[in-house]
């Protein structure tokens, strides 16, 4: 499956069939999570926990955590455990939690990010099952209750005007499921914060398609807090409203999307976390990404 297709066609599943996932798929998912935990998670301070008994998890959290305050019922969940509340740990944890979304997608399974804001210490301890740390997110997963057909996709309606022929990527898109996306020029700056990157400059650098597709990176309540500052040979990823903790999770998801697209399009895809102690209240730099 091409990564570009994943970015366009992957959407949250909020209704699952009651039957669990086949054992062979559970074994493959478990092996993938174990590999992430042993090769990256231990070093970066997070782990992905497979919770096979979804009914017990749902019963424990119903009325507390959830998507938009509503707990999602699913046969299985994956918990994102963090050693501590730290922006770097949050970014790396979210990056690899989204990689689990891609793994599930490749297995024809649906998934949905769930926020654990507001759960009690007792509920969190139950999810951790004796492990130290905190859990801020779960990933509900299973077989979708409704298989999407061609007519069920999130069809895009474009505001077609005279500018569209000259700048098809700059037109804001409005989708049938209320997932309006900011246009490329609303999210990309050139050299410095606030300096809008001209369409012609992105095209000249050969990054227009990459930046067009990366807009599909999901974010909490579709707020799209991430911005890219194009430099010479690299970009810096930043978040607006840096005091909002969810934005660092969204930054990790964006980095996973950006890396996958960059690899597929033969761009350099190396990145590293930036510890930005500037105290800027408008935005905060999160990562350096080679382009």
Image: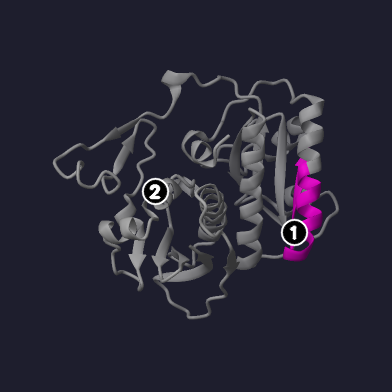
Is residue 255 shown left or right of residue 73?
Answer: left
Q: Secondary structure at mark 1?
A: helix
Please tell me the numbered disc located at residue 209: 2
Question: Residue at coordinates 55% horizontally, 54% vertically from top-left?
Answer: 259
Question: Is 251 within the magenta?
Answer: no
Q: Nearer the viewer, residue 5 or 273?
A: 5
Q: Position of residue 109 (x, y in %)?
A: 64, 29
> Looking at this rendering, what residue extends furthest in the left direction?
162
Q: Position of residue 23 (x, y in %)?
A: 81, 26
Q: Nearer the viewer, residue 164 or 143?
A: 164
Q: Which quarter of the figure has residue 101? A: top right
Q: Which residues are magenta?
A: 32-52
Q: Nearer the viewer, residue 72 or 178?
A: 178
Q: Which residue is mark 1?
A: 40
Question: Is 50 within the magenta?
Answer: yes
Magenta stretch: helix, strand or loop mostly: helix
Q: Nearer the viewer, residue 212 or 48?
A: 212
Label located before the other in sequence (2 or 1): 1
């Amino acid at each position: 499956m091409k990564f570009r297709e994943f970015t366009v066609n992957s959407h949250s599943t909020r209704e699952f069939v009651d039957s669990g996932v086949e054992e062979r798929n559970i074994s493959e998912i478990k092996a993938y999570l174990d590999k992430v935990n042993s090769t990256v998670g231990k070093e970066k301070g997070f782990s992905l926990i497979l919770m096979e008994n979804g009914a017990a998890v749902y019963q424990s959290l119903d009325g507390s955590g959830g998507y938009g305050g509503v707990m999602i019922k699913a046969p299985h969940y994956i918990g994102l455990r963090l050693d501590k509340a730290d922006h770097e740990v949050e970014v790396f944890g979210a990056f690899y939690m989204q990689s689990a979304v891609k793994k599930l997608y490749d297995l024809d399974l649906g998934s949905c990010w769930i926020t654990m804001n507001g759960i009690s210490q007792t509920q969190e301890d139950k999810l951790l099952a004796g492990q130290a740390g905190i859990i801020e997110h779960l990933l509900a997963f299973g077989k979708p209750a409704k298989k999407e057909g061609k007519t069920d996709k999130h069809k895009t309606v474009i505001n077609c005007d005279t500018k569209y022929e000259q700048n098809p990527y700059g037109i804001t898109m409005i989708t049938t499921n209320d997932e309006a996306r900011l246009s490329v020029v609303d999210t990309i700056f050139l050299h410095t914060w606030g300096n809008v990157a001209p369409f012609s400059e992105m095209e000249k650098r050969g990054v227009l398609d990459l930046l067009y597709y990366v807009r599909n990176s999901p974010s909490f309540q579709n707020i799209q807090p991430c911005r890219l500052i194009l430099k010479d040979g690299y970009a810096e990823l930043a978040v607006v409203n840096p005091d909002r903790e969810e934005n660092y999770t969204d930054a990790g998801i964006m980095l996973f999307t950006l890396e996958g697209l960059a690899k597929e399009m033969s761009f350099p895809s190396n990145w590293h976390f930036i510890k930005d102690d500037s105290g800027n209240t408008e935005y905060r730099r999160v990562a350096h990404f080679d382009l």
